[in-house]
Image (cartoon, rainbow, N blue to C red):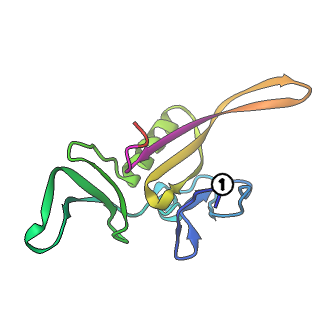
Amino acid sequence: MAHELTMRNGRAEMAYVGETPWHGLGQQLKPGASIDEWIAAAGMDWKLARSRVRFGEGKNQRTWDDRVVLFRGDTKAPLAVVSDQYQTVQPRQMLEFFRDLAAANKLTLETAGTLRGGAVYWALARMPEQADVGLGDRIKAMSLMSSSADGSRK
């Protein structure tokens, strides 16, 4: 799966407006969809949870005191082992923040979703600026926000 989109119950955790993406996956929304519609369609309606890391068996069981496992609250799928100081951002929080940022700067939400089982989540918006680069080619400015539950986005 070159796209790395999270698949849950046969659906890609991704939503978009406009043309169908190259991979043909995700849920299409109408322009102006509410943030709750985006969160549900993009599969970002779950919470990131944490638990102490325990290993070993019986009398030999130990706890890794300065590490926690981050996991999806809905499926309980583990996403990463990180420091107990690791600060998490919930998928919903990230999308809500991006919505507010987009509204303040006249951006239009284009796509959002999760990758690698939910370890990474993102939102992409179109900026109003465009530039002609010659011969009819036009560059459209975009803004990407992403966060992670695996320490890959800092």
Q: In the rendering, at what x and y percent does residue 88 appear?
A: 30, 47
**Could you say where residue 43 lies in the image, as x and y percent from the top left?**
49, 63
- For the N terminus, the quadrant is bottom right
Instruction: Place residue 15 in its image quadrant.
Output: bottom right
Q: Nearer the viewer, residue 52 or 36?
A: 52
Quarter of the rendering occupied by the C terminus? top left
| Residue drawn at 21 percent across, 50 percent down | 67
Q: Is residue 148 magenta?
A: yes
- The residues colored magenta run 142-151
Q: Position of residue 96 (x, y in %)?
A: 42, 48
Q: What's the amino acid at mark 1?
A: Val
Q: Residue furthest front?
A: 60
Position above or below: 103 against 21: above
Q: Compared to 60, does 146 lie above or below? A: above
Whether residue 36 is visible = no
Instruction: Look at the picture and state if 147 lies above or below 141.
Output: below
Percent across and percent down for residue 86 are: 26, 43
Q: Is residue 78 left or right of residue 36?
A: left
- Residue at point 71%, 53% (across, down): 18
Bin the neighbour count of mark 1 within 10 Å (Cα to Cα): few under 14, some 14-19, many 20 and up.
Answer: some
Q: Nearer the viewer, residue 30 or 149?
A: 149
Is-magenta flag for residue 23?
no
Q: In front: 86, or 111?
A: 86
Secondary structure mostly taken by the magenta-highlighted segment of the chain: strand
Q: Which element carries disc 1, helix, strand or loop? A: loop
The residue pinned by badge 1 equals 17
Given the current orientation, which residue lies at the most extreme left position?
A: 59
